[in-house]
Image (spheres, rainbow, N blue to C red):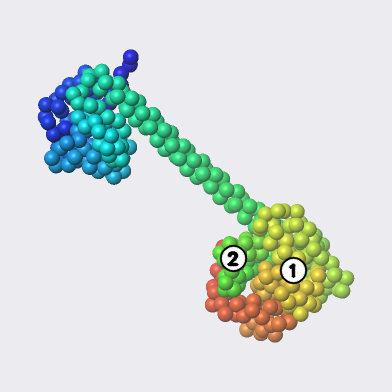
Amino acid sequence: MTRHSHTILVLDDEPHNVLLLRELLRKQGHKVVGTSSPIEALQIVDRTFDLVLSDVMMPEMNGFQFVEQLRSNPETEDIPVIIVTTLSDKPDRLRAVQSGANDFITKPVDAFELEVRTASMLRQKRQQDEIKLFQQDLAGMVEERTSDLQRTLNQLHTSHIESILHLAAAAEYKDEDTSTHIKRMSRYSALIAKSLGQDDHYVDLILRASPMHDVGKIGIPDDILLKPGPLTAQEWETMKTHTTIGGKILGAGSSEYMLIGTSIALTHHEKWNGTGYPAGLSGENIPLCGLICAVADVFDALTSKRPYKDAFPEDKALSILREGRGVHFSPRVLDAFLDNLDAVRDIRAKYCDDHAN
């Protein structure tokens, strides 16, 4: 039969027994390391060993204690152990099993029995190693596939966000004066959401979805959208439909971003007192995302140039916002915005129309 070379440790306090087992095992084609000291054996043995043969009655440490020490070390806990002993009583054999021994050979050692029992233990060790290797390979493969999946999801997420920004920009591109409006407005919205104590996930949703608030303007004729003067009553009714147009465009999606984007598109012109549009919602019946975006959108509209007006100074814009507290705007949402004016100014400075980032 085909023999495989393995590394075997032989431990016996009688040197002549070590020599005997070493010669028998070498004839079987194995590499053998022998020692008469359990302490030395524990220092020598490591995961490169395939099998240990140990005596029981030794002065420094008996074989049971040696096996227990072997099993307590993660490096050597899986190495099979054959107890070579003159003990044959049932209690001794049970003690050996309890300590972690795998098999027994009775002294004096029979060469054929040694070969059979050694081959059996080494075969089990080889199968055990193959299983462990398979588990390691499987774990590595799972980790690699998980990493690949995460990269793919990240790429999809990035593509999704880019698509949202392009969609939002499509509604703004016709008016150069609002080219960075969506960047400022979305960051104001995220700032308010965070100040209100919303979790990071919700803050990110607001940041990513709020740029789509005016996507419905795609459906508004240019002569109304870009009109430099006041709108007629009929033109104003047409302009207001950008909310429902946006809701229809975004409502076709099913992602979290599209769902919250739909809500924002439909509700960012609702007012706290119920006089807004398109549904005339009031108070807490207006979704939080709509309440947040209302403040962010109006502030940026007031402080930015539009076809129909010049930019208002900050003091005037803030005065208008404060006048709308509890009328146009949710008190707690407006207060969250006003409590963070330094951060608001930083956003305005970073994303000003002349230095779009």
Determine the image quadrant of residue 165: bottom right
Give the SS element for disc 1: helix
Give the SS element for disc 2: helix
Q: CA distance from mark 1 to mark 2?
A: 18 Å
Mark 2: amino acid? Val
In this view of the protein, can residue 24 be seen by the observer? yes
Q: Nearer the viewer, residue 244 or 153?
A: 153
Q: Residue furthest left?
A: 15
Q: Quadrant of the C terminus?
A: bottom right
Q: Is residue 240 above or below residue 75?
A: below
First in residue order: circle 1 vs circle 2: 2
Q: Which residue is mark 1?
A: 267
Horizontal side of 272 relative to 72 (left or right) equals right
**Can you give x and y, in whole percent of width and height, for residue 124 in the image?**
36, 28
**Can you give x and y, in whole percent of width and height, for residue 146 in the image?**
51, 44
**Can you give x and y, in whole percent of width and height, for residue 314 in the image?**
62, 80
Q: Is residue 141 above or below residue 282?
A: above
Q: Nearer the viewer, residue 341 or 106?
A: 106
**Can you give x and y, in whole percent of width and height, for residue 236 in the image?**
83, 71
Q: Residue furthest right?
A: 234
